[in-house]
Amino acid sequence: MGDRPDVPEEFVARIDAVLGGWRGVTREPAWVGIRWKVRDATIAHVFGGEDFLFRIIFRGEPDEVAAFDHMGPPYFKVAWGSNVIGMTIDEHTDWDELAEALQDSYRIQAPVSWAADA
C-alpha cells in the first residue's frame, strides 16, 4: 500500500460537529483514516487515498445511492455494500449538504428509537 495523507484536522472537526452529539456515536481510528460508529455499525469513514484525495463514505437508502452515483463528482460508487455512498472532500465541499447526508447515515445505522431523535 502506498503512502496516504492524514485527514486534515479541520475535516475531522467538521464531521465531529455533525455526528459527535448524537446518541451512541463514537469516533475511532480505522484501518486507514477515522470512522464514526453507533454500536457496531459504521456511520461514516473518512480517509486519504494513495492519490492524495480525501474521501468519505456513508450510508444511504438504495434510491439515494443510485442518485448520488448518477450525479458524478464529487460522488462515486463504492464497490461494496448496497447502501454505501462515497464522496471526495476538499476545500470546495458543501459541508451543509454533507451534514444532511451524515444525518441520514446515522438514521440508517442507529437503533430506530435513537434515530428518531436525530
Image (cartoon, rainbow, N blue to C red):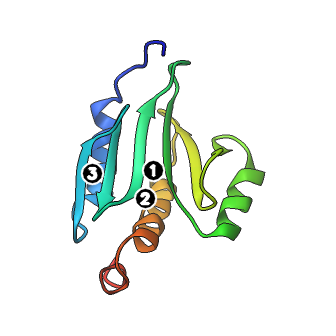
Whole-percent x, y for residue 99 in the image: 43, 59
Q: Which residue is mark 2?
A: 99
Going from N to C along the chain, the mark reached first, 2 or 3, is 3
Q: In the image, is residue 35 above or below residue 109?
A: above
Q: In the image, is residue 71 above or below residue 32?
A: below
Helix, strand or loop for disc 1: helix
The answer to whether marks 2 and 3 mark residues whose Cβ atoms lie closer than 8 Å is no
Q: Which residue is mark 3?
A: 16
Mark 1 Cα-neighbour bin, 10 Å: few <14, some 14–19, many ≥20? some
Going from N to C along the chain, the mark reached first, 1 or 3, is 3
Which residue is found at the position 24% from the left and 49% from the top? 27
Quadrant where the C terminus is found in the figure: bottom left
Residue type at mark 2: give it. Answer: Ala
Residue type at mark 1: give it. Answer: Trp
Which residue is found at the position 32% from the left and 52% from the top? 36
Q: Is residue 23 left or right of residue 69?
A: left
Which residue is found at the position 43% from the left and 19% from the top? 4
Is label 1 or label 3 in front?
3
The answer to whether marks 2 and 1 mark residues whose Cβ atoms lie closer than 8 Å is yes
Name the foreground residue: 35 vs 40: 40
Which numbered circle lies on residue 95? 1
Residue type at mark 3: give it. Answer: Asp
Whole-percent x, y for residue 52 in the image: 50, 19
Mark 2 Cα-neighbour bin, 10 Å: few <14, some 14–19, many ≥20? some
